């Protein structure tokens, strides 16, 4: 298996007033291609900082980080922007779609910042990605005409469209009701089955049951890194949920 | 990100906030329109003054006697006799910046025809007097060189004199009038010129050969002034220098002594009159320019609001790969779009307003291309300048914080 992510003794300090806050205190792990990992921790455990680091938005104070064999810590601001554009797909808790903009245009957005992709290719890829998340019939709906679950699907399509090395989901089901959350989880499991590498950052222990591996953080350190021997199927859980009867 | 996409984004951002975008633009529209209108009014009044002045003579330079001292007493200009016919001949033959020269003598008195009489002025000149003073003969003919040599008792008369002596619309060519008891035959009537900008009637005169005025009316041999026409207005200074040199030499004025003549050019008069309108134009343009500046500050304000409002969007764009310069370009183009659109509408409004002003008040207005280009350029620069800081702020946002901004 190919290493997608390799963290070696990552430390991240913030200076707040006169104090130094150690958000990450030496984190090391490797994520291989095709893994579906949850990163769990309560608030203050450093998971947001870790997510920012993994997403190349932030650079660690110390340690080394390789994403698809590229050393991120030594990169400048612009190079990191390019890496984000080519290798990472973000899914946020609050979708972050552009207002009054169609699904296709939202999904096209990452490709717009890639000068090597022509307008026609861009549109084709966006439609492919939207079809993959089951929104083939919502291509030209605007973001304010869609439900939360649909918006999150658009966001996932946007994360897929650049064919990234890793998808980073930050509490991607946090704003959704149980049923819709499972629908999204089904989608993630489907993408995983298609060979995508997914990192799901959450504080919800329930989600870990549907992933192959769980990394738990506490106080900026990894406290456990376990494989899940019995991954549940989100599809089955969804089927067993009581149907909304109102 | 390429320019087409940036423009699309900017258009969409504007369309998403139509009223706000338009109000912001309005500042620029009013600014540009007022700059154009004010400059058009200023240039227009300058033009009408210059037209009035040029009606008084083609690049006219007047040489007059002056500053003559007799026993320490400065003489009145009219009694001085320093300008002679030889000066006229010298100016006519030995200068290179002058195209036409006419000696001038004049006197006032009553012109009489039958039982009508009128006070008027008699000017004596040569054939070139017409060209220099931009006069035209309407009926009859100009006097000839022959008439000048013979000091013929012939004259051309202005329309006012015709009206006063013969009644309106009459044709007096061939008839004789009397001036200072001397009978003078009318050989032509001058074309009407109307009043000049200072309210003087330009048609109340009688034109005669200068020799006739000198010998038959005034009995003098000197000249009262010499009118010259300069090749081109831009050579006025050279012509004046040339005339000064020539006359000082001919009058044998020693180094350091004062001239015994005075040179007046229409350029001086024109400069004096237009300097007032120039100042007014600058003042008007400055006020209009300030409104343009205020418009620019409006853009800056709105762009700051827009950046704050769209912090999350900026965060998102950055997290999916937008570089700082992409964000900078996005907001800069948006502010340039506002100012350029505003500028175009402003040019339109300014030109329309100027046209309406001209149509309604009959003001002379001149829209000069440079004033349109200038105000348009200024408003584009305004867009860049006032858009820069908000765009800079947007591009230097931290994506981590921007994406979580509430």
Image (cartoon, rainbow, N blue to C red):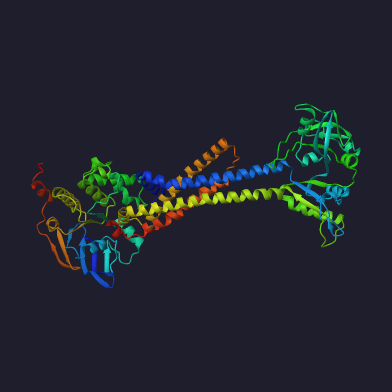
Between A193 and A59, the one lying in front of the other is: A59
Q: Residue furthest front?
A: B115
Residue A28 occupies quadrant: bottom left
Viewer-nearest residue: A135 or B71: B71
Examine the rendering and report whether any part of residue A206 can be seen.
Answer: yes
Residue B330 in view of the camera:
no
Q: Residue extending furthest top?
A: B170
Left or right of B367, for residue B312: left
Query: Residue B91: horizontal and vertical position, in percent?
Result: 83, 49
Please determine whether, in this image, residue A56 is positioned above or below residue B275.
below
Q: Position of residue A129 (x, y in %)?
A: 25, 47
Q: Position of residue B280 (x, y in %)?
A: 59, 49
User: Is B100 located above or below residue A168 in the figure?
Assistant: above
Q: Nearer the viewer, residue A58 or A74?
A: A58
Identity of the residue drawn at 61% across and 43% down: B44
Position of the C terminus of chain B, as image quadrant, is bottom left
Q: Quadrant of residue B114?
A: top right
Closer to the camera in the image, A244 or B305? B305
Q: How many marks?
A: 0
**Residue A150 locus on image (x, y percent):** 21, 46
On screen, residue A182 versus residue B23, left or right, reads left
């Amino acid at each position: 298996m190919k290493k997608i992510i390799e963290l070696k003794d990552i430390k991240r300090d913030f200076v707040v007033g006169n104090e130094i806050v150690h958000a990450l205190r030496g984190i090391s792990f490797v994520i291989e291609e095709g893994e579906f990992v949850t990163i769990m921790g309560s608030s203050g455990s450093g998971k947001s900082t870790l997510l920012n680091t993994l997403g190349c938005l932030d650079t660690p104070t110390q340690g080394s980080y390789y994403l698809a064999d590229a050393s991120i810590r030594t990169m400048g601001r612009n190079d990191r922007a390019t890496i984000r554009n080519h290798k990472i797909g973000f899914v946020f808790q609050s979708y972050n779609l552009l207002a009054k903009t169609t699904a296709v245009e939202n999904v096209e957005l990452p490709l717009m910042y890639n000068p090597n992709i022509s307008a026609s290719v861009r549109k084709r890829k966006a439609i492919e990605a939207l079809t993959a998340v089951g929104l083939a019939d919502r291509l030209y709906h605007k973001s304010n005409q869609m439900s939360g679950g649909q918006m999150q699907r658009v966001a996932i399509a946007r994360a897929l469209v650049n064919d990234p090395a890793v998808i980073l989901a930050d509490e991607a089901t946090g704003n959704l009701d149980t049923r819709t959350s499972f629908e999204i989880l089904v989608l993630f499991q489907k993408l995983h089955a298609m060979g995508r590498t997914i990192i799901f950052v959450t504080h919800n222990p329930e989600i870990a049951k549907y992933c192959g591996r769980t990394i738990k953080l506490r106080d900026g350190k990894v406290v456990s890194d376990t494989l899940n021997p019995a991954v549940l199927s989100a599809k089955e859980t969804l089927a067993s949920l009581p149907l909304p009867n109102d | 990100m390429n320019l087409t996409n940036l423009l699309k984004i900017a258009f969409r951002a504007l369309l998403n906030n139509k009223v706000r975008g338009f109000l912001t633009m309005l500042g620029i529209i009013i600014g540009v329109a007022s700059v154009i209108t004010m400059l058009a009014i200023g240039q227009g009044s300058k033009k009408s003054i210059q037209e009035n002045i040029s009606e008084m003579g083609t690049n006219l330079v007047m040489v007059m006697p002056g500053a003559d001292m007799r026993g320490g007493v400065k003489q009145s200009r009219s009694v001085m006799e320093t300008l002679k016919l030889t000066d006229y001949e010298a100016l006519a033959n030995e200068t290179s910046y002058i195209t036409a020269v006419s000696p001038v003598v004049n006197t006032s008195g009553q012109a009489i025809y039958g039982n009508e009489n009128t006070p008027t002025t008699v000017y004596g000149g040569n054939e070139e007097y017409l060209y220099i003073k931009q006069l035209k003969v309407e009926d009859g003919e100009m006097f000839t060189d022959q008439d000048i040599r013979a000091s013929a008792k012939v004259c051309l008369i202005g329309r006012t004199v015709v009206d006063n002596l013969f009644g309106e619309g009459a044709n007096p060519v061939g008839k004789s009038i009397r001036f200072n008891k001397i009978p003078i035959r009318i050989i032509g009537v001058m074309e009407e010129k109307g009043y000049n900008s200072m309210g003087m009637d330009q048609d109340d005169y009688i034109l005669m050969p200068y020799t006739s005025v000198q010998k038959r009316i005034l009995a003098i041999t000197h000249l009262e002034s010499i009118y010259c026409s300069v090749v081109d207005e831009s050579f006025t200074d050279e012509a004046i220098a040339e005339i000064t040199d020539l006359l000082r030499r001919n009058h044998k004025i020693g180094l350091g002594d004062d001239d015994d003549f005075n040179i007046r050019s229409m350029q001086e008069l024109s400069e004096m009159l237009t300097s007032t309108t120039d100042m007014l134009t600058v003042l008007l343009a400055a006020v209009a320019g300030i409104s343009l500046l205020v418009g620019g500050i409006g853009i800056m304000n709105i762009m700051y609001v827009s950046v704050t409002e769209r912090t999350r969007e900026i965060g998102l764009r950055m997290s999916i790969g937008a570089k700082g310069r992409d964000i900078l370009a996005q907001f800069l183009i948006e502010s340039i779009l506002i100012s350029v659109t505003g500028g175009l509408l402003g040019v339109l409004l300014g030109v329309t307003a100027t046209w309406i002003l001209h149509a309604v008040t009959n003001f002379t207005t001149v829209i000069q291309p440079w004033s349109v280009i200038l105000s348009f350029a200024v408003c584009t620069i305004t867009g860049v300048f006032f858009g820069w800081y908000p765009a800079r702020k947007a591009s230097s946002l931290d994506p981590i914080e921007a994406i979580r901004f509430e």
